[in-house]
Amino acid sequence: MKLRPLTEKEQKFAEENHELVYSFLNEKRLNEDDFYDVVIFGYLRAVQKWCENSVKFLNFSTYAWKCMQNELKDHYKFLSCQKRNDSVVSIDDAIYGDRIIGAERTVSYDEYVTRLKTELLLHELARRLPEREMRIVKMRVHGDRLQDIARAEKLNFQQIGRLLDDIYPTVIQIFYS
């Protein structure tokens, strides 16, 4: 659900129940300065849904807590994704023979060759597989869980398993040809 400006009724309701945000942060032992901006969006989404009467079958505090927990989980997932934790190579670093200036920010030759070989193998695989299967292989290679792949491709676990089983002979053929 995309967040939109709150109506007056929603603003009043949000103000009346705002202590839930601080209760959540305190219960989870999270620093308010660091995490308030993360969980508040889950809280505001909960307020909007609650005021729309779409989740009245739940206790508001339970629903708000769940929404804030989901925002926190998404925040941690965002921080741990590969592009935020991968090694960085600067084009400003100079490499002279065996001497590397700024070596702490460069990748080793072996790591570079391994990445290059992987990319070449994936390129060959992309030439032989349909687009959807290739997306699934790339997600799997990048460490995505089967649950995340199934959700992204709108498939169930059995379908993902069958697709991966069908892809396996092609992968073996590429690796050993």
Image (cartoon, rainbow, N blue to C red):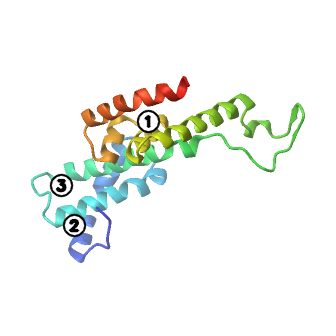
Type of residue at label 3? Answer: Phe
The image quadrant where one finds the N terminus is bottom left
**Which residue bears the numbered disc 3?**
60
**Circle on res. 13:** 2
Q: How many marks?
A: 3
Q: Amino acid at mark 1?
A: Arg
| Label 2 secondary element | helix
- For the residue pair 114 and 3, the one nearer the viewer reads as 114
Q: Say which quarter of the image contains residue 8.
A: bottom left
Which numbered disc, 1 or 2, marks the residue closer to the eye?
1
The residue singled out by tag 1 in the image is 140
Callout 3 secondary element: helix
Packing grade of label 3 (10 A; few <14, some 14-19, many >=20) is some
**Residue at x 25%, y 53% (from the top left corner):** 64
Residue 17 seen in the figure: no
For marks 3 and 2, give the CA distance.
11 Å
Residue 77 visible to the viewer:
yes
Report the side of 122 relative to 21 (left or right).
right
